[in-house]
Image: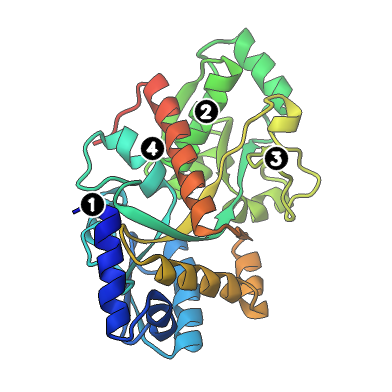
Amino acid sequence: MTLIHRTALAITILAAAGITPFVLAQQYPTKPIRMLIPSPPGGGTDVLGRLLQDGLNKMWGQPIIVDNRGGASGRIAAEIAAKAVPDGYTLFFTYGGVLVTGLPLFRNLPYHPIKDFAPVAMMAHVPGVLLAHPSFPAKSVAELIALAKSKPGQLTHGTSSIGSSSHLNMELFKQMAGIDMLRVSYNGDAPALIALLGGHVLFAFNNVVAAAPHIKSGRLKVLAVATAQRVPGLPEAPTIAESGLPGYDVLLFYTLVAPAKTPRTVVNKLNQAVSQIKQNPDVKLQLSRLGAIPMEMTPEESAAFIKSELEKWTKVINTGRIESN
């Protein structure tokens, strides 16, 4: 029996019972929903996920149970979500790296980031920013690139662990600029930021939220933001694309997905719910305080975006011969 025939048969059976996909979507949810999050409580992913939890609780009156499964760079939570029953009662709220960098970094995963998930909705992205210590002579991306080319392999930049956004953002930067620099890796974004503040490294990527107080105090200077468009919190800061590297664009994004084969009607209802939650003034205020910029996409647009990001970062990681354990 073909997939078309099986689908038609399922619809016929449901219709005979008076239950159409539309009715299923109208009734959903009828019991608690588990939302897996690939990080411990209190982190950025968890904070954003709990905004969704609260919004869905209020909207539907059903408990949304957050299940924090940190560790293994998100692989533990992702595997559980990928293998869950695709009925809309197990969801996975995650930072984008789990879906778009895990496969090229680790090579073998117990799930496939595209085949095993149904993209539901985008939540937001947190802009990255290219920062420098005040003593660093370059004042722009163009000056940094020129300096790096005049001193190949000598400039030091800080990153978090291998495969982190600060690491891969800089790897893409180096590949697009055609420059060689010395990477100094730290165990997390906070230690990397402390090293930058102390002048132990000259420049690095970090996120706007963590960097904001140090930018205001003058302890760090902004060279450019990493997004395609300028960001509200730093309106005077140019993008990397407009100041030396056309086409450069990276997003630290957060998204909601479900197991593959989750009914489309349920996916669409969830997408509409997430969109509605982001319109809430309190949620908008909390996102703003976190430095997060809302992203609006349909499930189809989310799927295309995630696929293109996976292809992009696979190329960057393979070109840089980057591997993680």
Residue tagged by mark 4? 163
> Mark 2 vs mark 3: which is more N-terminal?
2
**Would residue 23 appear left or right of 240 to someone viewing this image?**
left
Residue tagged by mark 1? 2
- State the separation of the CA atoms marked 3 and 1: 57 Å
Closer to the observer: label 1 or label 4?
1
Residue 159 on image: x %, y %? 46, 36
Quadrant housing residue 131: top right
Residue tagged by mark 3? 222
- State the separation of the CA atoms marked 1 and 2: 44 Å
| Badge 4: residue crowd in 10 Å (few <14, some 14–19, many ≥20) | many
Secondary structure at numbered mark 4: loop
Quadrant where the C terminus sits is top left
* Residue type pointed to by label 3: Val
Quadrant where the N terminus sits is bottom left
Secondary structure at numbered mark 3: strand
Secondary structure at numbered mark 1: loop
Quadrant housing residue 79: bottom left
* Residue type pointed to by label 4: Gly
Residue at coordinates 36% horizontally, 48% vertically from top-left?
A: 98
- State the separation of the CA atoms marked 2 and 4: 12 Å
> Mark 3 vs mark 4: which is more N-terminal?
4
Closer to the observer: label 3 or label 1?
1
**Would residue 291 appear left or right of 192 to someone viewing this image?**
right
> Mark 1 vs mark 2: which is more N-terminal?
1
Residue at coordinates 40% horizontally, 82% vertically from top-left?
A: 23
**Would residue 16 appear left or right of 189 to someone viewing this image?**
left
- State the separation of the CA atoms marked 1 and 4: 41 Å
